[in-house]
Structures are given as structure tokens and as C-alpha cells.
Image (cartoon, grey):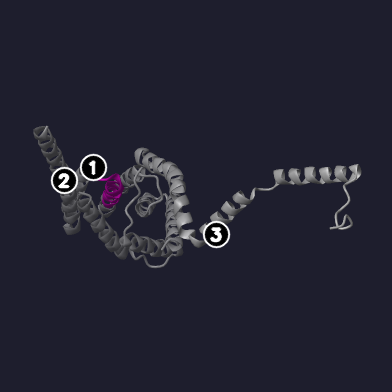
């Protein structure tokens, strides 16, 4: 083996450049994840892609718990706080009475013949409904 | 402990039965008063029926306000209309206004009471006031019909 095949020894300037490069490469490692961490992250992502339902389920309970607390509080509050007078019961006969009243008022204000008997008849039916609902309230 | 619970449940049961019978009696009294008014034809019968309706109106309401309030307004309206048939418009006006005072909400029975009030006012010769009452009734009627059209 001749000395021509061997590299000549590094000059001090070349050694200084190499040392600088080595320092730069070491600094790069500070800004990148390690190979192990990258591998673990990739495995996590692949695992989530393969099991989307499991991921969804694993996150849902915490959301349900946090949203259900104010909801439950609102329901309890609404139950405890009185809401003023009760609304009148809705009856199909109430609609008929409204229409009969409308016909009566229209006739009255326009001077047409008055259908008072019809109004009385429909009001009697509505009364019957009210009495029936009083019985049902028991 | 078990005996106490049993006694308490029996007590609650008795209270519930008592309230149910009170409601039943109240409903029957109203129904009978209206039935008598339906049958009445002579002045004497009309007057007697009016007294029966007045007694029913003066009763302490038994049941939910949502049901008893319109029943009371309906009673007042019926009494007022009986007075109109007896040619007693002043009494009719008083009863129509008692019914209106029961509830200020725009309900179908308030509309009916305003029509009766207008009839009484007209019989008393107060045509302008009668027309105002009719217009108020029409306004309530239109509002209720609009609400029903929007929420069928």
C-alpha cells in the first residue's frame, strides 16, 4: 500500500470546518423529534385512523359529563321555579268557537243577519269540553 | 317505620280522594246549573236558572286554574245573557264585566264576554261604547285566529 491512496492529514483549517459542521448537526437534533418519538407518533396516528369509533367513544363521555351538568341544573331549576299561571287547555272546540265568534262579529259589524244561535251552540260544546277536562284533571 | 309509611300513604290517599270528590261536586254543580238554564223558558225559570248559575259562580273553584278560570268566565257570560233575555241590561253589563275581570288575557271567552257587554251596552242605549266593545272582541278574535293559523 502506498501513501498515495491514503488521505493526507487534515489541515487545522479543515479540522476547524469539520468541528463547525459537527456542532451544527448536534444543534439540529435539538429542533427535531427523536426517531423513537416520530415512530411512536406515527403509530398513534395509524392506530387512530384504524379505530375512529374507539377514539370517538373515548372522547365522548367527558363532553357528555360537562354538558349534562348545566343541563341537569337547568331542568331542576325549571322544575323548582313557578312559571306563572297555567295556560288554558287547548281544545279543538276552542277553534270552532273562535270561528263562530268571527262569523258573529263580522255579521254584526257589517249589518248582516246574526247567527247568535250557532254561537250559543258552539259555546255549549266548548263548555262541555271544559267540564270534561275538569273531570280528567282528577 | 313501615307502619309510619303505611299511615302516610293512607293519609295521602284520603286527601286525594277528598279533593277528587270536591272537584266532582264542583263540576256537577256547574253542569246542573247550565242544564237548568238550557231548560228554562219562562221568566220565572230563567230567574231561577240565573240564581243557580250565580251560586255556581260564587263557589270556591275546585281544580286547575287553567280549567276553572274559563268555566267561571263562561258562567258569568251565561248569567249576563239570561239577564239580557229578562230585559235586565244593567245586570247583564255587571255580570259581563265580572267575567271580564276574572282574566285579562285575550282568550276566546273574553271575546264572548265582550260581545255580551256590547249587547248590554246597546240595550242601555250606549251605542258608541257597544261598538268599542265589539271592536275589542274582533281584535282578540283576529289575534287568536292568527295564532292558530301560525301554529295549526
Left or right, residue A66 beside residue B71: right
Q: Are marks 3 and 1 in contact (CB under 8 Å)?
A: no
Quarter of the view holding residue B1: top left
Label 2: which residue?
B20
The residues colored magenta run B63-78
Q: Are marks 1 and 2 on the same chain?
A: yes
Between B137 and A97, the one nearer to me in the picture: A97
Q: Is mark 2 on a helix, strand or loop?
A: helix
Q: Indicate the chain on which mark 1 is placed.
A: B
Q: Quadrant where the N terminus of chain A lies? A: bottom right
Q: Do the residues labelled 1 and 2 touch (CB within 8 Å)?
A: no
Q: Which mark is residue B61?
A: 1
Name the residue rendered at 38%, 64% in the picture.
A99
Quarter of the view holding residue A116: bottom left
Q: Is mark 1 on a helix, strand or loop?
A: loop
Between B92 and B141, the one nearer to me in the picture: B141
Label 3: which residue?
A46
Q: Indicate the chain on which mark 2 is placed.
A: B
Name the residue rendered at 91%, 43% in the picture.
A13
Comparing marks 3 and 1, which lies closer to the viewer? 3
Amino acid at each position: 500500500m502506498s501513501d498515495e491512496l491514503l488521505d493526507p492529514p487534515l489541515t487545522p483549517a479543515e479540522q476547524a470546518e469539520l468541528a463547525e459542521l459537527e456542532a451544527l448537526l448536534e444543534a439540529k437534533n435539538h429542533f427535531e423529534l427523536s426517531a423513537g418519538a416520530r415512530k411512536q407518533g406515527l403509530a398513534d396516528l395509524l392506530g387512530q385512523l384504524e379505530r375512529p369509533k374507539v377514539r370517538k367513544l373515548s372522547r365522548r363521555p367527558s363532553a357528555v359529563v360537562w354538558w349534562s351538568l348545566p343541563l341537569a341544573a337547568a331542568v331542576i331549576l325549571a322544575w323548582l321555579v313557578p312559571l306563572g299561571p297555567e295556560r288554558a287547555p287547548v281544545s279543538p272546540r276552542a277553534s270552532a268557537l273562535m270561528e263562530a265568534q268571527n262569523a258573529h262579529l263580522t255579521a254584526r259589524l257589517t249589518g248582516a243577519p246574526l247567527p247568535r244561535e250557532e254561537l250559543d251552540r258552539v259555546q255549549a260544546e266548548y263548555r262541555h269540553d271544559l267540564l270534561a277536562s275538569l273531570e280528567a284533571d282528577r | 317505620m313501615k307502619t309510619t309509611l303505611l299511615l302516610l300513604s293512607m293519609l295521602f290517599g284520603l286527601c286525594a280522594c277528598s279533593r277528587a270528590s270536591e272537584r266532582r261536586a264542583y263540576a256537577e254543580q256547574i253542569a246542573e246549573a247550565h242544564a237548568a238554564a238550557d231548560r228554562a223558558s219562562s221568566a220565572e225559570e230563567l230567574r231561577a236558572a240565573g240564581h243557580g248559575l250565580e251560586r255556581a259562580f260564587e263557589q270556591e273553584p275546585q281544580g286547575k286554574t287553567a280549567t276553572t278560570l274559563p268555566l267561571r268566565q263562561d258562567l258569568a257570560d251565561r248569567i249576563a245573557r239570561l239577564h239580557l233575555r229578562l230585559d235586565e241590561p244593567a245586570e247583564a253589563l255587571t255580570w259581563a264585566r265580572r267575567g271580564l275581570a276574572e282574566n285579562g288575557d285575550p282568550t276566546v271567552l273574553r271575546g264572548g264576554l265582550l260581545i255580551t257587554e256590547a249587547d248590554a251596552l246597546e240595550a242601555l242605549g250606549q251605542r258608541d261604547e257597544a261598538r268599542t266593545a265589539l271592536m275589542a272582541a274582533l281584535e282578540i278574535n283576529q289575534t287568536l285566529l292568527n295564532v292558530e293559523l301560525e301554529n295549526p
